[in-house]
Structures are given as structure tokens and as C-alpha cells.
Image (spheres, rainbow, N blue to C red):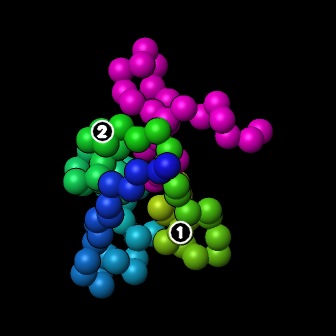
Amino acid sequence: ILKWDGFDILYENEHKHLRLDAIPKTELITKLEKEGPYSLDRLKPDIVAIPHPSYNQDHVAVFEASFTALRIHAGGLKHSPDFSYYPR
């Protein structure tokens, strides 16, 4: 059974909400990694669902930021989900 922790809307104002491609990637990555109530550092999830990149530029921005935030870090100093069960 999967446990769902919840969700958070990182950008509620329309200036940023529909313009995620215009926000610096480092800002998106930091929000996903550290700043949100459901950040990766806080939850240390086993599985993370991220959008597939598509023709929608916001989906691409979130995919790239998520992929970077989930990167494996040297020395095990940072949590990352187990990628061993993903199909190759």
C-alpha cells in the first residue's frame, strides 16, 4: 500500500504558476529539495512520481528540476530513492 503524504502548490500567483519555464532552475530545484513542506529532504521518499517531459514547457521545467533534485549524491550524504526497481 502506498502512503500519500499530501501536496503543496509551490507557486500560487499566476505570474509564476503558468510560467515555470521562466523561473531559474536552481529556484525550482531548491524548492523541491529543501524548502517545501513535502520536500525531498523532509520526506525522504522511496518512490517519486514526476511528469514526463512533453510539449508543455512547464512539464519540461518540472521534469528537469525533479530529475536534478533526485540525483544521486556522492558518499550517500543525501537521500535519494532506490532506482534499482525501475525498468531499464
Residue segment shown in magenta: 65-88
Which image quarter: residue 16? bottom left
Instruction: Name the side, left or right, on which 75 lies relative to 8.
Output: right
The answer to the question of whether label 2 and label 1 lie on touching residues, with beta carbons closer than 8 A, is no
Identified at 24% across, 81% down, the residue is 13
Q: Nearer the viewer, residue 38 or 25?
A: 38
* SS category of the residue bearing label 2: helix
- Magenta segment, prevailing SS (helix, strand or loop): loop
Give the percent coordinates (x, y) of residue 46: 46, 39
Q: Nearer the viewer, residue 5 or 81?
A: 5
**Disc 2 versus disc 1: nearer the observer:** 2
* Helix, strand or loop at mark 1: helix
User: Which residue is the site of mark 2?
Assistant: 41
Question: From the viewer's perspective, is residue 22 above or below residue 40?
Answer: below
Q: Amino acid at mark 1?
A: His
Q: Amino acid at mark 2?
A: Asp
